[in-house]
Amino acid sequence: MHHLSAHQLSDAFKKGEFSATTIVDHFLSRIRQHDEVLGSFLNLFEDRLHDTAKKLDHKRQMNQPLGKLAGVPIGIKDNIHIKDEITTCGSQFLLNYRALFTATACQRLEDEDALLLGKMNLDEFAMGSSCENSSIKPTRNPWNLDYVPGGSSGGSAAAVAARLCPISLGTDTGGSIRQPASLCGIVGLKPTYGRISRYGLVAFGTSLDQIGPFSTNVADSALALEVMAGRCANDGTSLREKPMNYSQELHGSLKGVKIGVPWHFLENLNDDVKANFEQSIETLKNAGATIVEVNLDKLKYSIAVYYIVATAEASTNLARFDGIRFGVRSNDAKTLDEVYDMSKEDGFGPEVKRRIALGTYVLSSGFKDDFFNKALKVRRIIYNEYQNAFKQCDLIAMPTSPFTAFKIGAIHDPLQMYLADIYTISVNLAGLPGISIPSGFSNDGLPYSLQLIAAQKQEHTLLSAAHGFETITGFTKKMPEMAK
Ligand code: GLN
C-alpha cells in the first residue's frame, strides 16, 4: 500500500480494494515500526483517524460521492493548525497550545476526504535548514540515518521519503519545502505567494510564507495543490483568481519549453552538484527544451536581504508569544516584566532568540533606513530581475541545494547554515512558485535535485515540465531501503 502514489491509493480505495480503516492501520503500523528512529512525527491522531476512516468507509458503502483525496493519509507540519490538536511549532513555548481553529489548507484536504495522520517535526518556528533546531527531537534522513533530512519541514520530507505517508504539508519561507525535498529525494512544491491560504499557519515571515505539498511524484503534488489552492476569505493576501485543475495539466512535453539558467550565479557550486546539474540540463535539452542563459546577478544579495526581511517580520510575529496570551508561562516569574522576560528566555531556543534580536535591531529607529528599508529596495530589484528573465524564458532552472544531505551536527556556524538556502531564498523574495525534483544520487547514495522556477501563477507550466523531467529520468521511483 505504501508503494502506491496518492492517486493510486485513492483509486484503490474508491474501487473497494482497500477500506479506509485498512489504509489507516497499515500506515499507523509503518509509523510505529520506523518512526522511533526516524523521528518524523510529533503527534499521531489515532482516535480521530479511526473515526474518520469509519465514516469514510460508510460513505463509500452508501455510494455517496467521494473526494479527490479519499483515503489518502496526509501528515501536517506542526506549525499549521488543526482544531483541538496541539500545535507546538517545534518549540518548548507551545508544548501546551491547542489550536482553536483549523487552517484553510487542512480544511480543504479534509473536505476532499483525506485522512489527516498527525503533526510532523520541524525546526523551531520553521527557522532552520536541517531540523536540528527542533526543540523536541531530531529527525533523521531515511537515505542515511546519520544525516539530516533538511529543514525546516524535515519531518514532513523524511516521512514521505520513508513512505510513512504519500503526501505531507510543509511551509516554505526561504526554502523549507524545496530544500528538505531535495535532501530526502522527493518532490516538494512551493506555490506562488498567496496561492494557498496562510490562514491557520503560524506566521514566521508574513510576506514570504507559503504552504505547499511534499509527495513522491509530481502528479500527487499537483493534486494536493488543486485541492488547497484558491481564494480564502480569512487571508487577505490569498490570490483572487480561480486556481486550475493542476493534475489535468501535466502534459509533460518539454518540446519548445524555454529554460533559463543563470550560469554565473552557479559558479561556486561544488563539483559533484554542478556535474549533476549539468546532466539535468542535458536531459532537458535532449527532451526538446531550449536552454538560454539569463542574468540574475542580483541574486547574490538574496541571503542578505532575506535575513533582514525575514527576521524583521519574525520579530514582529513572535512578539505575541509572551507567556500570557500564548505559550508556557515561566513558573519563577513574580512580576509582569518577569513573566515576559522569563517566559521568552525559557521558551525560545537559541536560533529563535537570534532571529528576534536581529529583527528588532534592523527595525529599530536609527537603523531602519540602513537595513530594513534598504533590504526592501533590493528585494524589489531582485523581483524586477526575475521579471526581466521571464521575458526570455518560461522557466528558470537551478540546483535546489548547494550540497547533498550533511551529517547531523556537521554545521555549527549559523551563517554556514543560512547558505543552505542560497538557491531557494530569492524565489520567496519574489513570490514565485518553485519545485524541487530528484535528479540523481551521489556515490554515497544521497539524492541530488533540480529546482525549476516559474513566473507568478504559472504553476501549471512548472508542474508539467517537472512531470516531463520525472518521466524521462525515473529518479522519483527510487526509494530508500527503509521504504521498501
Ligand atoms: N532556512 C531558512 C531559514 O532558516 C528558511 C526557512 C523556511 O523556509 N521556513 O529561515
Image: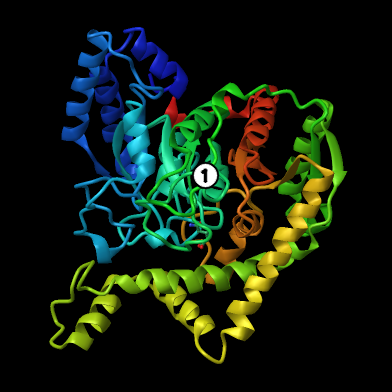
Residue 219 x %, y %: 55, 26
Residue 19 quadrant: top left
Residue hosting label 1:
240
For the point 45% across and 76% down, the residue is: 354
Is 259 on the left or on the right of 434, as rendered?
right
The quarter of the rendered structure image containing the C terminus is top left
The answer to whether residue 480 is visible is: no
Is 10 on the left or on the right of 88, as rendered?
right
Residue 267 quadrant: bottom right
The answer to whether residue 211 is visible is: yes
For the point 53% across and 70% down, the residue is: 414
Residue 412 x %, y %: 51, 68
Instruction: Bin the neighbour count of mark 1 within 10 Å (Cα to Cα): few under 14, some 14-19, many 20 and up.
Output: few
Provide the secondary structure element on which disc 1 rests: loop
Residue 133 quadrant: bottom left
| Nearer-the-camera pick, 349 or 326 | 326
Residue 416 x %, y %: 59, 67
For the point 19% across and 47% down, the residue is: 84
Is 456 above or below relative to 134? above
| Nearer-the-camera pick, 412 or 49 | 49
